[in-house]
Amino acid sequence: MTLSRLYLIGMPGAGKTTLGRALATAFELPFRDLDEEIVRAEGRSVADMFRAEGEAYFRQREAAVLRELVTQHPRLVLATGGGTPCFHDNLRVLLETGLTLYLAVAVPELVQRLQHAAQARPLLAQLPDPAALEARLSETLAAREGFYDQAPLRCAAPTCTVEAVQHLLATYQASA
């Protein structure tokens, strides 16, 4: 089994883009970040989309751009947005067209990673302090974990490295 498409899912701040870039290099595959592709397609930021049209519009664009990427790229490492698998049957698309990896990161670690960048993220921008950020992330993870847990591969921080993913893939492919 040759790896052609690898999708990374998980919470905001899980490291999907950073690890995805490294995995793309290691596997000699193109890399795409779904949010970056949406911004390119729309010609405006995710925050601007949320502000002007709301989350429902963004989620529709996200689903459309995801399907375009899958159609256009038979080989790909894709870092999805944190909510991508939870809307518009996107998880089914991911599971049916490639191998999906859930980057699992504990909420306290997410708070550390996101507390200084939360203002740039539309669903976190209005939170007043780290306690509110932690509460929102806990609530969001609880709502999304049932989607994330459907990924056939799971890698937990802080030990989720390129080497750890390569080992996971080898084990998965040997058992398939």
Image (tube, rainbow, N blue to C red):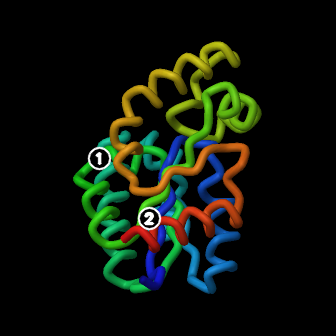
- The quarter of the picture where residue 93 lies is bottom left
Percent across and percent down for residue 16 are: 60, 55
Q: Which residue is mark 2?
A: 42
Of marks 1 and 2, the one in the foreground? 1
Q: Nearer the viewer, residue 2 or 172?
A: 172
Task: Tell me the residue at 39%/36% (across/down).
Answer: 144
The amino acid at mark 2 is Glu
Task: Tell me the residue at 46%/85% (across/down).
Answer: 2
Q: How dense is the environment of label 1, judged by Cα within 10 Å: few (below 14), some, or many (20 and up)?
A: some
- The quarter of the picture where residue 26 lies is bottom right
Disc 1 to disc 2, C-alpha distance = 19 Å
Percent across and percent down for residue 70 are: 35, 76
Q: Nearer the viewer, residue 172 or 59?
A: 172
Q: Nearer the viewer, residue 161 or 53?
A: 161
Percent across and percent down for residue 7 are: 46, 64
- What secondary structure is marked by label 1? loop
Task: Tell me the residue at 50%/34% (across/down).
Answer: 123
Q: Which residue is mark 1?
A: 87
- The quarter of the picture where residue 124 lies is top right
- For the question of whether residue 43 can be seen, the reply is no
The amino acid at mark 1 is Phe
